[in-house]
Image: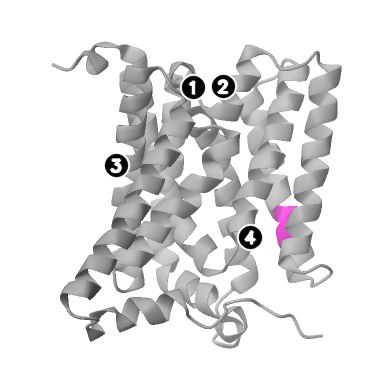
Amino acid sequence: MPTILLYEFMVRALIGGALVGILAPTLGVFIVLRRFSLIAETLAHVALMGVAVGLATNTFPSVVALVAASLGAILVEQLRSRGRLPGDVAMAVVLYGALAFAVVVIGIAGGFNVDLFSFLFGSILSVSPLDLWLLAGLTIAVLLFVAVFFVDLAQIAFDDDLAKVNGVPTGLLNLALAILTGATITLSMRVVGVLLVGAMLVVPVMVGLRVARGLRAAMGTAIVAGVISALVGLTIAFYVDASAGGATVLTALGLLALAHLWVALRRWRRGGGAGLSASASRDGSPNHQHHHHH
């Protein structure tokens, strides 16, 4: 039996990592397709603000962060859907506001303590049984949500306005997606860290979109890539005593590089064959940016 499995905290970390590996790419697919990669960063900073407040007031940081991220998700969605601010501007406003607030609170609370570092960079040691139960519950909820609304979510991802015309409840689904993303980021913080959790929502998805054809296949591939990244990354982190989040994200980036290489090799072997036109056209697909007309 490998040494790594003799430690209870490592088994917890690996289970947590695998759950994050399933959870993040499942939602990430819809975020990436909508060119919303920034929302992950934004909600991560809102969650960090929640953690700072939680640590400063001695309440449960995870719970405060969860509430903060959900409210942040609602705020961004409101600003964006009302068309008051373009999506990226709305997110930047919330991101920097939350970051500034977090910095002030951390300063007042007496600087960076060890606990805050585990939230920032992810810590193998800090994954508790409670974190695992919450992660497992959220993973089931997200998988059910995506299974039930897959077609609607796909429509929204490719064309928000057309989805609306087709009678898809875009407002509600966008809000649900934003809140679930906020919850995912908050609960993944312990494993990957606030600074890198956005990468887990995006990088495995890029692997899936690069390699697979069709949205379902891409999502499946992204989940496999996410789980491998987490398990390999945490194992590396354990043996070389590195940051859990850093090792996980670097592994994911390694997989992305391999995916690009594999696609290039396949293209070269076909002599620039037509097999890639599908994925190439998807990569360079027309913008899914949403312009709100008033």
Q: Nearer the viewer, residue 139 or 277?
A: 277
Q: In this view, does 82 lie to the left or right of 125?
A: right
Which residue lies under the disc numbered 3? 228
| Marks 3 and 1, how far apart at CA | 18 Å
Where does residue 24 sit, x and y in percent of width and height? 45, 48
Q: In this view, does 58 lie above or below 133?
A: above
Which residue lies under the disc numbered 1? 123
Q: Where is the N terminus found, in terms of image quarters? A: top left
| Marks 3 and 2, how far apart at CA | 22 Å
User: Start and end of the magenta stretch?
Assistant: 74-78
Which residue lies under the disc numbered 2? 118
Where does residue 151 sit, x and y in percent of width and height? 42, 74
Q: Which of 231 and 281 is in front in this view?
A: 281
Which residue lies under the disc numbered 4? 175
Q: Where is the C terminus found, in terms of image quarters? A: bottom right
- Please, what secondary structure does the residue beneath circle 1 have? loop
Residue positioned 68% across, 13% down in the render: 113
Residue positioned 57% across, 65% down in the render: 173
Where does residue 183 sit, x and y in percent of width and height? 57, 43
Q: In this view, does 138 lie to the left or right of 96?
A: left
Say which amino acid is labelled 3: Ile
